């Protein structure tokens, strides 16, 4: 997202499987915090997920309150074998991951 030609926030959508994708690298500049930019980025990512027929969008996060406000619910990481198999197994924190898994269903 840009304002006055400056990038003030970014978010990525990483497809993990036929019906599963993950919001990655959601960041908003501290200068622009609290202005709804994060929520706009999440909404944009969800629109993109709809276009490619993804049914579930997940986030592994520490910002659980923010994601709850964006319509995400808690989910057990064991319910996300695609994420674990593709990414988590290579992470040095795989045995003691402290991120919280959250999911939002598309549509």
Image (tube, rainbow, N blue to C red):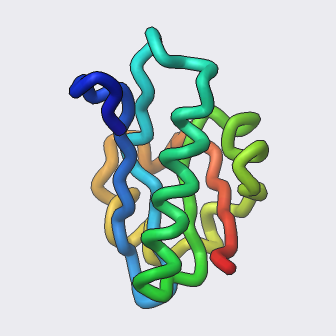
Taking the view exactly as shown, the residue that stands out farthest to the left is: 5
- Residue at image x 59%, y 75%? 56
Residue at the far front: name it: 4
Residue at image position (62%, 69%) is 78
Please give the name of the residue rendered at 53% of the width and 41% of the height, measured from the top-left corner: 96
Residue 54 pos. (x, y %): 50, 82
Q: Name the spot of residue 87 as percent of width and height, x first.
A: 34, 61
- Residue 86 in the image: above or below residue 95: below
Q: Quadrant of the N terminus?
A: top left
Residue in the foreground of this view, choosing between 52 and 87: 52
The percent position of residue 58, horizontal first and vertical second, equals: 56, 62
Side of 35 where 73 appears, left or right: right
Left or right, 19 with reference to 88:
right
Residue 35 is left or right of residue 65, and the answer is left
Quadrant into which the C terminus falls: bottom right
| Quarter of the view holding residue 72 | bottom right
Query: For this rendering, which residue is in front, 52 or 1?
Result: 1
Q: Position of residue 23 (x, y in %)?
A: 46, 55
The residue sitting at 68% across, 74% down in the picture is: 105
Asked if 81 appears above or below 65 in the picture, the reply is below
Number of numbered discs on residues: 0
- Determine the image quadrant of residue 3: top left
- Looking at the picture, tell me which residue is in the foreground, 73 or 49: 49
């Amino acid at each position: 997202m840009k304002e006055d030609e400056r990038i003030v926030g970014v978010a990525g959508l990483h497809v993990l499987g036929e019906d599963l994708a993950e919001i990655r690298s959601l960041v908003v500049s501290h200068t622009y915090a609290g202005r709804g930019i994060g929520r706009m980025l999440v909404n944009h990512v969800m629109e993109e997920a709809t276009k490619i027929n993804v049914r579930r969008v997940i986030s592994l996060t520490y910002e659980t309150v923010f994601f709850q406000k964006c319509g995400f619910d808690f989910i057990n990481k064991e319910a996300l074998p695609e994420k674990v198999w593709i990414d988590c197994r290579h992470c040095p924190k795989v045995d003691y991951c402290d991120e919280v898994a959250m999911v939002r269903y598309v549509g």
